[in-house]
Image (cartoon, rainbow, N blue to C red):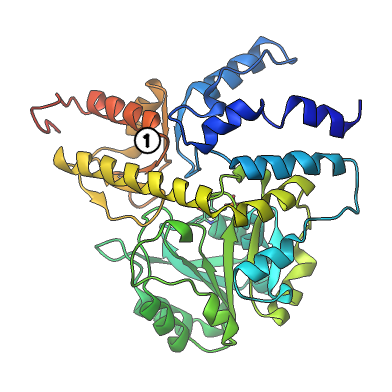
């Protein structure tokens, strides 16, 4: 039987009925099913079962997965799985068209994580430094230290926003050593945005040849009218690289696709450092994902609803939450996050890791309604809250 025949018989991940469950954003998505026995024996089986049973609120994923049309597109693309040179569904031109840029403005990566690394490899040569805030998406800083570069990390403001004048001052002060400025917008882990006015302030305030990497992984969840994508800054000729991903709104984290939007000159500088290791399935899936605006809207709507409901409830119990514009939020627990995380884990809920120096804050990703219910139950248990009698936090 050919790969194509096998795939069309079995369906991509368990058949159309299960897929429909996903599409309708039913409370228990397909992935929550118990897995079939694994060939590797019971240890592997236990590990997979434990993972499947967890409420996974630790990696800011989309718990619903790709929509039906995306699954169909990926299923069809399976027939290319033994090929090197195969039609790619026109993924680069679809991404370019969707964002109002040309194909020359696009660089694909195996997740936007690869794009962040490519930017580091390109612009942090000879021990240059990246300037950004802490906490932020720290893989940029980790990668910098891995390639013997360095990071200048500035603190957040008291309201957990990024302080643009400090970023400008640090960049000017260390101008000759700065490889690029990193701006995560909205920021992970706080969920706070930088306004379009502040982005312009940053670009106008730093020397005009300093590249700025603007990580818009959570762009699609933002409601703040003061926020805007920075793609227009690429088009106006600034040395801006916008990083985007199919891992969040589009639910394709394990499929690995992200991209950079930058000037053709910057794309050319960066492309020798990219591996080009984007798989056939995700290329076809991404084209379908961009077209499926109804699925995008459903994920966005339910995610924002659940975030608001959860944070409202936590606030009503006396726990403050940082206003978020993403598919996660941060709350102040008043206890060390490592200890709190371990308590959640005992109750089958995985929550965010520590983000120094905010060690009494917990980052919680928005899962399904059922997962958020499990989070709240565990939370009340850990913090000894009796429903109906208000907070008894100690
Ligand atoms: C801000 C930010 N940027 C980039 C990434 C990398 O995502 P991916 O490599 O899946 O595109 C993440 C992942 O959580 C993130 O939070």
Q: Which residue is mark 1?
A: 338
The answer to whether residue 211 of the structure is visible from this angle is: yes
Q: Quadrant of the N terminus?
A: top right
Viewer-proximal residue among 344 and 85: 85
Q: Which residue is drawn at the image coordinates 21% and 44% (left, top)?
A: 312
When asked about the image quadrant of residue 12, the answer is: top right
Q: Nearer the viewer, residue 310 or 130?
A: 310
**Quadrant holding the C terminus:** top left
- Callout 1 secondary element: helix
The residue at the far left in this view is 389
Residue for point 25% across, 37% down:
335
- Total marks shown come to 1
Q: Residue placed at 26% from the left, 42% from the top? A: 309
Q: In which quarter of the view is residue 391 placed?
A: top left
Residue 18 pos. (x, y %): 59, 27
Q: Position of residue 105 (x, y in %)?
A: 69, 75
Question: Looking at the picture, how far across and down is residue 41, in whole percent?
Answer: 71, 11
- From the viewer's perspective, is 299 left or right of 287? left
Residue 362 visible somewhere in the drawing: no
In the displayed structure, does residue 80 sit left or right of residue 392? right
Q: Does the closest atom of ligand 1 sit within 8 Å of the Cβ of label 1?
A: no
Residue sitting nearer the eye, 92 or 146? 92
- Report the front residue among 79 and 137: 79
Residue 353 % position (x, y): 43, 41
Quick check: 217 above or below 354?
Answer: below
């Amino acid at each position: 039987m050919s790969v194509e025949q096998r795939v069309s018989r079995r369906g991509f991940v368990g058949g159309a009925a299960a897929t429909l469950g996903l599409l309708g954003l039913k409370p228990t998505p397909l992935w929550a099913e118990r897995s079939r026995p694994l060939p590797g024996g019971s240890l592997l089986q236990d590990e997979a079962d434990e993972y499947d049973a967890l409420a996974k609120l630790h990696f800011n994923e989309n718990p619903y997965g790709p929509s039906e049309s995306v699954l169909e597109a990926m299923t069809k693309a399976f027939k290319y799985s033994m090929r090197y040179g195969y039609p790619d569904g026109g993924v680069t031109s679809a991404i370019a068209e969707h964002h109002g840029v040309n194909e020359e403005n696009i660089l694909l990566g195996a997740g936007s994580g690869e794009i962040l690394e490519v930017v580091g490899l390109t612009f942090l040569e000879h021990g240059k430094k990246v300037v950004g805030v802490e906490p932020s998406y720290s893989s940029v800083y980790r990668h910098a230290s891995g390639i013997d570069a360095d990071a200048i990390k500035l603190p957040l403001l008291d309201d957990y926003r990024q302080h643009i004048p400090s970023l400008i001052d640090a960049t000017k002060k260390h101008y000759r050593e700065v490889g690029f400025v990193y701006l995560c917008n909205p920021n992970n882990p706080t969920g706070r945005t930088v306004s379009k006015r502040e982005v312009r302030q940053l670009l106008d305030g730093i020397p005009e040849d300093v590249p700025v990497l603007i990580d818009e992984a959570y762009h699609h969840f933002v409601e703040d009218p003061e926020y805007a994508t920075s793609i227009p800054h690429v088009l106006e000729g600034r040395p801006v690289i916008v990083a985007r991903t199919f891992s969040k709104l589009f639910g394709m984290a394990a499929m690995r696709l992200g991209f950079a939007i930058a000037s053709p000159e910057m794309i050319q500088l960066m492309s020798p450092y990219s591996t080009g290791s984007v798989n056939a399935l995700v290329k076809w899936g991404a084209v379908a994902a961009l077209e499926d605006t109804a699925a995008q809207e459903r994920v966005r709507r339910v995610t924002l609803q659940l975030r608001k409901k959860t944070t409202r409830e936590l606030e009503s119990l006396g726990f403050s939450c940082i206003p978020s514009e993403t598919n996660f939020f941060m709350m102040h627990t008043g206890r060390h996050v490592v200890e709190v995380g371990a308590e959640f884990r005992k109750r089958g809920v995985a929550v965010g890791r520590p983000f120094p120096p905010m060690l009494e804050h917990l980052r919680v990703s928005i899962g399904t309604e059922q997962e958020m219910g499990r989070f709240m139950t565990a939370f009340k248990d850990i913090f000894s809250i009796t429903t109906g009698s208000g907070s008894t936090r100690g």
